[in-house]
Every structure is written in structure tokens, then in C-alpha cells.
Image (cartoon, helix red, strand yellow):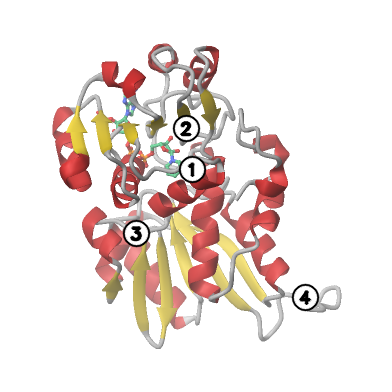
Amino acid sequence: MIQVAPGRWPGGATRFAGVIGDPVRHSLSPALHNAAYAALGLDWAYGAFPVAPWQVDDAVAGAAALGFVGLSVTMPHKEAVLRRADQVTPVVRQLGAANTLRFERGQVAAASTDGEGLVADLRAAGFEPSGATTVVLGAGGAARAAILALAGAGARQVVVVNRTEDRAQAAVALAGDAGVLAGAEAIGDAALVVKATPVGMPLGAPAGDRPGGGPSSAPAADAGASLGGRCRPGQLVVDLVYHPPRTPFLEAAAAAGATVRNGLGMLVHQAALQVAWWTGEAPPLDALWAAVGEAASPVGSAIPPSDRR
Ligand code: NAP
């Protein structure tokens, strides 16, 4: 643990990192990352930086020039930051989007930890995607990350259900041979259902409360509830939304007997993977969970907080 005299931190040797997005005011990432750095004893500090679309290139170049360790990237900049990337991971190449940049020796490396974070959270909840039949609702950025990660984890089938068919077709291709396009009737047949749409987020919520950012098309709570009502006992049902902790979709899925989980676990695990990539250390998951707090804990989980990996 670093020993810091009151009023002397951040100091001359403190290293910086942060999240860029628009908006980022309500981001939980500073709480997550700063808790992790403290637990690891690092003299690092992490802030939230609102960046307009026309400022993305300057923001990335500026952070690199200032010696930042890296940047988390949220909506709407996940594609735009690739203009500045010297190296990208295979996952970023397939998604065409990144949520993490690392600055090293004048180079910018880009990675995406969203899908891997989801799979890590599923495994922490006791669900193994390998060999499983899965359904992903949605075909946007979060859905694409989930589809690629579930297929990469060996899911037998990744069924994509989306409102707009051409986006669904582009997304299902990420699952290769495991990918299937279907309608909502497929929900009842899967072992795992992942909802990756903003449906159920309150319209009145500040935009920054939406991890995906941007204007929400969220009001279709009834539609969410009717999809949740198609779930059944024995399924794990995850809504990537975590504000509110329990959407009408999750309420309906729970009422139908499914085990339900919100998106907080994915948020924690994608941050943990960023911490691991930047520090080379095992991420302190208990500290990350403590940082986001019980108020936003995954619902329906029988797993005690200390075991939520
Ligand atoms: P996005 O790229 O804008 O995609 C949104 C998807 O939702 C699209 O497929 C869209 O369908 C669908 N959709 C939107 N409104 C709908 C409605 N009223 N009815 C049916 N489908 C609707 O957003 P995103 O970045 O993927 O984010 C999706 C959700 O995941 C957001 O709520 C975000 O907060 C959450 N998220 C959570 C985490 C986490 O760590 N927990 C991480 C990332 C995102 P069309 O293709 O037909 O437009």
C-alpha cells in the first residue's frame, strides 16, 4: 500500500489513466479503477474525461503525450479511437471497436474487454458457456461483443434476436458456424439469455447513467416484460442494464422462474481485465465489487459478494 501524506496526492510521481466518452459524468469507472489501484498499492489515479466526437484524436494523442497509462473508452468513441491505434487485438479487429487503450513506448494498443468481461461474470455465476445454447437480444456494440465472446468460449449455438434484421445479420456472422438468426420464440429454448438492448432503462435517467451512453430508445418496458415472460426455470438470464438493478425484463424472467443477473458483473469484470492489462497484476475483484457497492449488486444471484468474481 502506498503511504500518502494528507494533501500530497496526487504527487509528482502519480501516473494517470481515465475514461473518455460523451457523456461520462455518471461513469462508475473512476470508482472501480481507483479502488483497484489502491488495493494494488499503485500510485495511480483515474479520472473521467468528457470528449466530444471531434476531439477524440486529440484526446488520445494528448493522453499518450502526457504519459497516461491508458484510457478506457465508452460510447460513442469505441470505433473512432481505432484511428489512433498502432496495434489491435484480434477481438478488436473482428468487432471494429475497442473499449481500452494502452500507451507504451510511443505506441497505442487497443483491446476490447466487454465480451471477455461478460464471460468471466457468467463463469463467476457458475455458468459455463462452452457447449451451451445461448440467445443474445440485440445487435449493437454490447451485443456484438457478447456474441463474439460466447462463440469464442465454445457456445454450441449463439442465437441472435434483433429488431432490425440487417444489423442482426452482421452481428450473427461474428459467431461463425454457431450463429443463428431467430425471433423471440427462441428465448425459451436457450440455457442462457443475454439481453443487450437498453430497453428498461428509465428515460428520465441522466444519459451518463447509461453505460452504453447516447440517447436511449428505452421506453418499451412492456416489450421487455413480454420478452422476459418467455424465459423459464433452469435458465440463466442476464440483462446488461444495471440501472435500474432490476428491469421489467428481469422481473418477468424471475417471475417465470429463471435465475437472473444484471449487468453489473460484466461492468466489474471488464474493468478488472483493463486493470490486469495495464498493471500486469491479478485484479483485486473484492475491491472492485466493494467499489460499486451493494446498492447495485447483481440481482437474483445466490453467490455471496465475496465470491462474485
Ligand atoms: P447500441 O449499440 O445502441 O445497440 C442497441 C441495441 O438495442 C440495438 O440492437 C437496438 O436494435 C436495440 N434496441 C434499442 N432500443 C430498442 C427497443 N426499444 N426495442 C428493441 N430493441 C431495441 O447500444 P449498446 O452499446 O450495445 O448497449 C446496449 C445496452 O447494453 C445498453 O443498455 C448499455 O447500457 C448496456 N451495456 C452494458 C454494459 C455493462 O458492462 N454492463 C456494457 C455495454 C453496454 P436495432 O438494431 O434494431 O436498432
Question: The residue tagged with tag 4: helix, strand or loop?
Answer: loop
Place residue 304 in its image quadrant: top right
Task: Inspect the image, locate mark 2, and give the three-letter code of the amino acid beneath it.
Answer: Val
Counting from the top left corner in percent of width and height, residue 273 is at 50, 61
To which residue does mark 1 refer? 122
Place residue 186 in its image quadrant: top left
Q: How many discs appear?
A: 4
Question: The residue tagged with tag 2: helix, strand or loop?
Answer: strand
Q: Nearer the viewer, mark 1 or mark 4?
A: 1
Relative to 57, say whether 261 is above or below: above
Tell me, yes or no, whether the two marked residues, 1 and 3, touch with CB atoms within 8 Å.
no
Give the CA distance from mark 3 to mark 4.
Answer: 31 Å
User: Which is nearer the eye, 306 or 106?
Assistant: 306
Q: Earlier in the sequence, mark 1 or mark 2?
A: 1
Q: Nearer the viewer, mark 3 or mark 2?
A: 2
Outermost residue toward the right in this view: 6
To which residue does mark 2 refer? 238
To which residue does mark 4 refer? 1
Q: Earlier in the sequence, mark 2 or mark 4?
A: 4
